[in-house]
Image (cartoon, rainbow, N blue to C red):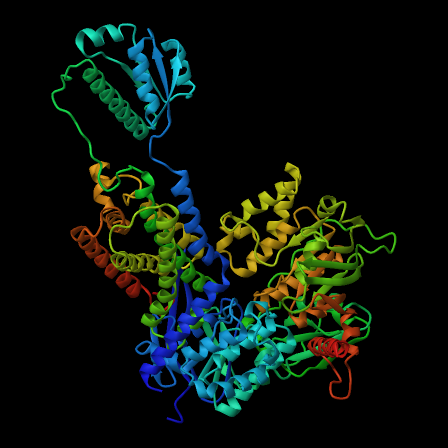
Amino acid sequence: MANTAALVFGAVSKTFVAGGMAVQALDAVTIRTEPGRVTGLIGPDGAGKTTLMRLAAGLLAPDAGSIEVLGIDVVKQPLLVQSSVGYMPQRFGLYEDLSVQENLDLYADLQGVPKRERAARYRELMHMTGLAPFTRRLAGRLSGGMKQKLGLACTLVRPPRLLLLDEPTVGVDPVSRRELWGIVYRQVRDEGMSVLLSTAYLDEAERCDEVILMHQGKQLGQGTPASFSEPMRGRSFHVSAGSIGKRTLQGRLSAAPGIVDAIIEGEQVRVVTAQGGMPTLPEALAGIEGLDIRPAEPIFEDAFIATLKGGQAAVTQPVADLATRSVAAATDDHAVIEVKDLQRRFGDFYAVKGVSFRVQRGEIFGLLGANGAGKSTTFRMLCGLLPVSAGEVHVAGLDLRYAAARARGRLGYMAQRFSLYVDLTVLQNLRFFASAYGLGRARARQRIHWALDGFELVEYANVTSGDLPLGYKQRLAMAAALMHEPDILFLDEPTSGVDPLARREFWQRINALAESGVTVLVTTHFMDEANYCDRLVIMAEGEVLAEGTPADMKARFRNEQTPDPTMEDAFIGLIEAHESAQQGSAA
Amino acid sequence: MTPMAAKRMRLRGMVRKESLQILRDPSSIAIAFVMPVVLLLLFGYGVSLDARNVPLAMVVEQADANTASLIGAFRHSEYFDPRPFENIQAAQKAFDLREVFGIVWLRNDFSRRLLSQGDAPIGVIVNGVDANQARITEGYIQGVWQTWLGDFARSQGVELQVPVVLEPRIWFNAAVRSRNFLVPGLIAVIMTLIGAMLTSMVVAREWERGTMEALMVTPIRIGEMVVGKLVPYFLLGMGGMLLSVAMALWQFDVPLRGSFWALTAASALFMLVALGMGLLISVVAKNQFVAGQVSIVITFLPAFILSGFIFQISSMPYAIQVITHIVPARYYVAILQSLFLAGDIWPIVLSNSAALLVMMLIFLGLARRKFHKRLDA
């Protein structure tokens, strides 16, 4: 029995029918994971990760193929499997109106944990998750990271032989993410548990013993993270140039032949080439003064992108020029957005407390933080959607307290969730937004044409918006927000749930807009995306922890152990400093 | 641990969790305890199907001792509030303006015909907009008229020439108070509300919040999940029932002529039927809003309209009468009205209970069969 595989999928297929359309969620997936290991299920949204998890948990039945969990046939004996595995669904499966202790008690009862063993197990779990001081608090009142840890504790209340975690780290701050990984590995070490964990964060692949790469229902490969990244050796490079900006450099590199991928990483551009070695760069690039090309240590993401693109050029077509006019150059150094001591209260809870920052014209300005840090609340106040409790907000020189409507005419807003009409077609949505912004007939026609062209939506013009692939929905939402040629664009979590390819394309569009003088404000919980911003603030619990350029932020945390700190290192450093300061003041 | 002990532990865990959720959620307390009180007060005091102090126009074209005596008879009746009018035109105007509900018209030959023939026609006009009220008013006017005519004949020393004399006796609700039959019937509506609507929404809530998914991947059996959900809501519903019965007895002075235990047993049975419906709805709907709407349309409204609680089933069109047979509240209302007003009429109580038992088995069985530990079934 010792060598029974934790999980075996034999040519498993699963199709869902939604709105008359069949969606192939899994297509002949065959996997085998060994016991006592952490296996990562990696892939963008729509890859079939959740379907695979649910199949393994016996919540779904496969259309074809066989599934064995811990040597048990799931289709024949789902109850036996459900008694042996621990499963944490995406929303953690917590009862928000029950306290931490009551949630634990419920799962202990359901899992049949004997009463006399409970006290010791609870103590261990609460210690591990750091929830010990909060056992009487309602689960709904916990922060995102704490909810995630409580969800995990509930799943672990009776140590399962296989732990299934469906995107446990989405939207959770990096500190909590790091802690979660610690707990998971401790379970593997102490209890000999097997773990299957799905994630859309590519950087988490490196933390797994083994990785299964998924894309659009197909399994692209299985192996150790190194087995993916190692073949990329000699194809990954860091490129920098002193004379031109990193965004310009990235734009030119991604258009160059023989280059699969070019992304901004820190102060340089990370390049993945189609074949080993750096291809001969075109004249325009080779001639740049101070161009510096150095081989880089390959990472999992390089392999992921290279596998998905299969050796194509970075972007099939250069993104059409989005700028239709250039915003008049700033004649003074007045900030386009000025926020002073901004506060927002909900009852006695401060969602935003004392936030201040300035954004210059044509800047890409980021708000970085975990879910619940106050990013979206700040945004809604800046857009005039939510009244300000205290403080000052000037947008485009207008005081939002008195001229919210006029200020709104100057800005475009793309909400966190797809906020267009899902039952209208792409064209109908664009027409609606053109009329909502009060564009004249001729101008509306011109802008709709621009949107369809610039966002490559022409062939989807008559498709119902709800049926669009996620990446296209996001393009449409952005086009709608730009119909009236705003000076300022607000993007709330624009890349959440979007696959890495669409994210790259999205940032290229943002860069093009910023180059033409549009000011862009963006919130994100992807640490690596902070590198695309000119400047940013890092937020936690409604407060700004730091403001500056990405380079400044990282430089603060450079030391012996981490000579080249990442944005995540900087973020974690700031959070820890903030927490110890709080404890210091509380003591 | 033995399998039985594990089973007991799981059940206890579910029951405790549901009970805590009920206590923490003000809306479930409101539906179980506030709503019954509001409905009872509304129906107990606000809605009355009786005719009492009905404003009546009295047109007397030639006043004399006889007409005065007849008007006196109307005035003494607790059902009427007679108002004199000079002529029929003025009375009609008041009638059109709805100042009076009916007109009694005594023509100028009233006394002459009364004395010569021993009988005289009186004109009666009632507002037929509310057919129920019109029929009742008409009957009462007839009653006052007949009684007065009898008295008049006796005072003249003659026996009245009436072929058959009706002497009505009203049983079970001698005072003919509509409250006495509305309030017991309302208990069926209230229990439907708690059993079907509340239950359908709380199960759907688990689907919506994603907790059902986590619950399913535990050793819990479907049967345990069903029982664990039902027990707290069963108790909540029985609490609502006791509250309603207490208000009926002590607030509205409705008599309870049958046995309390028969009432409790029948209520428990009906509660299980309602819970079965609620569970079935939520298993199919999986969304709080849809579950709420569906339960209003297929449980609450039929309990209101087709149960015989307000509208007499035997006076419904035949097709509708047939449909009422699939409304569980119909059987419960029949039991309630018998137990409260008539007593332990076992043939009625038992036959209707048997119907409820069959429905309970159908609904709970269907819910159990449709409830899978699977998301795609």
Nearer to the camera, B67 or A483: B67
Q: Position of residue A265 (x, y in %)?
A: 70, 74
Please state the horizontal and vertical placement of residue A11, each as a whole percent of the image: 37, 76
Q: Quadrant of the C terminus of chain A?
A: bottom right
Hey, which residue is sitting farthest bottom in the picture?
Answer: A2
Instruction: Choose between A269 and A564: the one closer to the eye.
Output: A564
- The one nearer the camera, A40 or B173, is B173
Which quadrant of the structure image shows residue B317?
A: top left
**Quarter location, residue A141:** bottom right
Q: Is residue B269 left or right of residue B89?
A: left
Left-right relation of A578 to B349: right
**Which quarter of the rendered picture does the N terminus of chain A lie within?**
bottom left
Q: In the image, A32: left or right of A359? A: left
Q: Residue B57's image quarter?
A: top left
Question: Which residue is found at the position 69% from the left and 58% from the top?
Answer: A345
Give residue A332's position: percent from left, percent from top. 88, 53
Tell whether A219 sits left or right of B150.
right
In the image, residue A123 above or below residue A478: below
Residue positioned most to the left = B163
Decide which of B105, A100 is in the foreground and name it. Answer: B105
The count of marks equals: 0
Q: Locate residue A376, reporting x and y percent.
A: 66, 60
The residue sitting at 46% across, 62% down in the picture is: B208
Could one spot residue B44 in this view of the protein? yes
**Vertical comparison of B52 with B13: above or below:** above
As drawn, the residue found furthest toward the right would be: A332
